[in-house]
Every structure is written in C-alpha cells, then in structure tokens.
Amino acid sequence: MTWLAIIGAVGGIVGMIGGLVSLRDRFAKGRPTGSLTTILHGGRELLAVRIKNTTEHDIIVIGATERRGVYFLAEDFETGNLLRGQVQEGMIKHFMLKPTEAKELILMPKFRGGVAVEALGKTKIDVLIYWRRGNATSRPQLPIAIRADTQMLRRIAGVE
C-alpha cells in the first residue's frame, strides 16, 4: 500500500466523520426539546410533557400524540378537551412558542371498558410532538420523541 492510498483512506474517514457532525448540527441542535415533568394542579401532582423552544426562532406546535394509545395529551381539564382526547389522538390546539419559552401538556390516561389502559401492565409509550419552524412553516420537521414506560410513569406520579 502506498502513502497516497493511506492518506486518501484517512482523509475519507475524517471527511465522513465531519459530514456526520454537520448533519447532527443541522438536525439536532436547531430543534425544540421535550421532556417528562410533573405539575401541581389543585394540590395533586400530575404528569406532564414540557415542550421548550431552544431555537432562535418562534416555533409552531401543530400536534402531539401518544402512539400506543395508553395516554393522551391535554392542555387543561375542560370537559370537551378530555372527551376529545379519549376519542381521538392529537386534539390539542396549535400554539406558538417564542425563543426560550416552554409549555406543559398534561399526560392523561386513556380508558377502555372503564379501566385505565396504563393499569393493564408495563407498556412502552412514545409521545410524539409535531412542530414547524416559525420562519419556514411549510417545511416538515422530524417530530420530537419522548419515550418511557407506564411503570416508570406511575412511580414518578407516586401511584406505585
């Protein structure tokens, strides 16, 4: 093997690493964040999902859903919002977040046959938050994913 081939191989590897770092900067850094948290409501601790805008621009949250059908997200305890959440997914209203602003959505259990689905055993959940940048609303963005399991969520909420 000649020196030119070795230099070419090393340059190719370094270039590939640089390309991967560039992709990470493009897709991971300019995104809002989502996390699980707890909030107090009427003296009761509730599970919630916090969406925080870490970007320089306003963002629009256009939907939020839990893929497995164990929970739904609600902005408040209005009867209409709770009923819509039990029946359909992603029924939150669109809202905007300014830079460094955050909002919490309450994580509510779904019921089937009068029993909370979360009580039927340990199940993995995936909360997906769909959003767009305020300066380019037509371009689709990868959703923010929050993953957990029902057993851990019950421990956080103080049920187990």
Image (tube, rainbow, N blue to C red):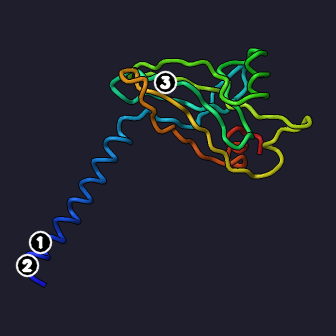
Q: Is 15 drawn above or below residue 155 in the view shown?
A: below
Query: Of the residues under marks 3 and 1, which one precedes in the sequence?
Result: 1
Comparing labels 3 and 1, the label whose residue is closer to the camera: 1
Residue density around tag 3, few if under 14, some if 14–19, many if 20 or more, within 10 Å:
some
Q: Which residue is at a point 54% across and 37% down the rendered structure image?
A: 35
Q: Position of residue 14 (x, y in %)?
A: 20, 62
* Residue at image mark 3: 102
Q: Position of residue 87 (x, y in %)?
A: 79, 28
* Residue at image mark 2: 3
Quarter that holds the C terminus: top right
The answer to which quarter of the image holds residue 113 is: top right
Query: Which disc, if any, is residue 7?
Result: 1
Tell me whether the residue at label 2 lies in contact with that at label 1, contact meaning CB atoms closer than 8 angstroms.
Answer: yes
Q: Amino acid at mark 3?
A: Ala
Between 101 and 89, the residue placed more toward the observer is 89
Tell me whether the residue at label 2 lies in contact with that at label 3, contact meaning CB atoms closer than 8 angstroms.
Answer: no
Q: Residue furthest bottom?
A: 1
Q: Is residue 111 left or right of residue 40?
A: right
Q: Residue furthest front?
A: 138
Circle 1 SS class: helix
